[in-house]
Amino acid sequence: MSVPAFSDIAKSANDLLNKDFYHLSAGTLEVKSNTPNNVAFKVTGKSSHDKVTSGSIEGKYTEKPLGLTLTQTWNTANALESKLELSDTLAKGLKAEGIFSFLPAAQSRGAKFNLHFKQQNFHGRAFFNLLNGPTANVDAVIGHEGFLAGASAGYDVQNGKVTDYSAAIGFQAPSYTAAVTATDHLSVFAASYYHKVNSQVEAGAKATWDSKSGNTVGLEVASKYRLDPVSFVKGKINDRGVAAVAYNVLLREGVTFGIGASFDTQKLDQATHKVGTSFTFES
């Protein structure tokens, strides 16, 4: 298995716990399309439970022989972003990114430069914010026979000081992964586990402890069950008694529907519950 990026050491467990739970928005609509000249479009719209609507449109052009990808994004906050990626062009396993953003209302501009370098037993990244600070964030993960160890650090160039540092260890196998991370100046600790039990069942759990806020440990457990080749259900619950369920089905080729709900099991008589739906169209 390839060595993940530092932020993805616990990706399997985090995806199981966080993805495809549609109650987080009252409604989500996503439309994806591809053109014959290697341009992919994605339009996303969301309606929050506070009746706030947001959306974005993205166009992505890919030139595979050159390892070039150009992405343009515009959202309802009138924020514009352009991303230029070069993969395996300067060196094998190296991806360079330039990200430029503009917010006309505030006349705010941003420029970032990122590097990703991936080899068989190493995955390193560097992120540079050129206009804000400037700041630099670097992380790296090394792996050997499934064992992983990584660290990250942030640095404020203008003030000449370290702004953050984190560390992580983990183990990954084809059917399960485990990880322990220490973030926010090694003050927030999380232990996660993911297990693909078989082709139909996945299970995972995550425990989190913030040493700055006391001795309380947060716990989440989740499971996913594939009903058939085109549908699945998910469920999770945390230590506060908040439970969530979700159902996802491929209605027809290119059309996916999802519905989900969350319930506070300790306040079933109160209006704290949430329901959300999602439609995704692909062509």
Image (tube, grey):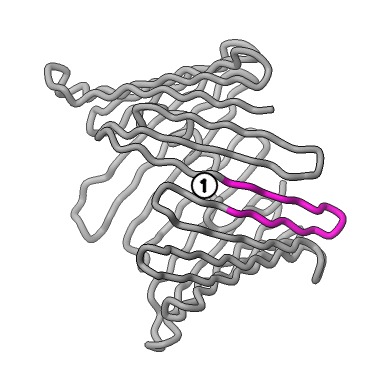
Q: Residue at x 39, y 41 (%)?
A: 54
Magenta stretch contains residue 255: no
Q: Quadrant of residue 43?
A: top right
Given residues 176 and 17, the one toward you in this image is 17
Q: Position of residue 126 (x, y in %)?
A: 58, 70
Three-letter amino acid code at the position of disc 1: Ala
Tag 1, which secondary structure? Answer: loop
Classify 10 Å Cα crowding around label 1: few (below 14), some (14-19), many (20 and above): many
Given residues 12 and 157, the one toward you in this image is 157
Magenta stretch contains residue 62: yes
Q: Position of residue 41 (x, y in %)?
A: 64, 41
Q: Is residue 40 above or below residue 96?
A: above
Q: Is residue 190 above or below residue 45?
A: below
Q: Position of residue 121 (x, y in %)?
A: 72, 60
Q: Position of residue 30 (x, y in %)?
A: 53, 32
Q: Residue at x 32, y 34 (%)?
A: 48
| Count of number-bearing discs | 1
Please report the bounds of the magenta region as a residue range: 58-72
Furthest toward the right, the residue is: 65
Furthest toward the left, the residue is: 269
Horizontally, is 112 left or right of 165 in the view?
right
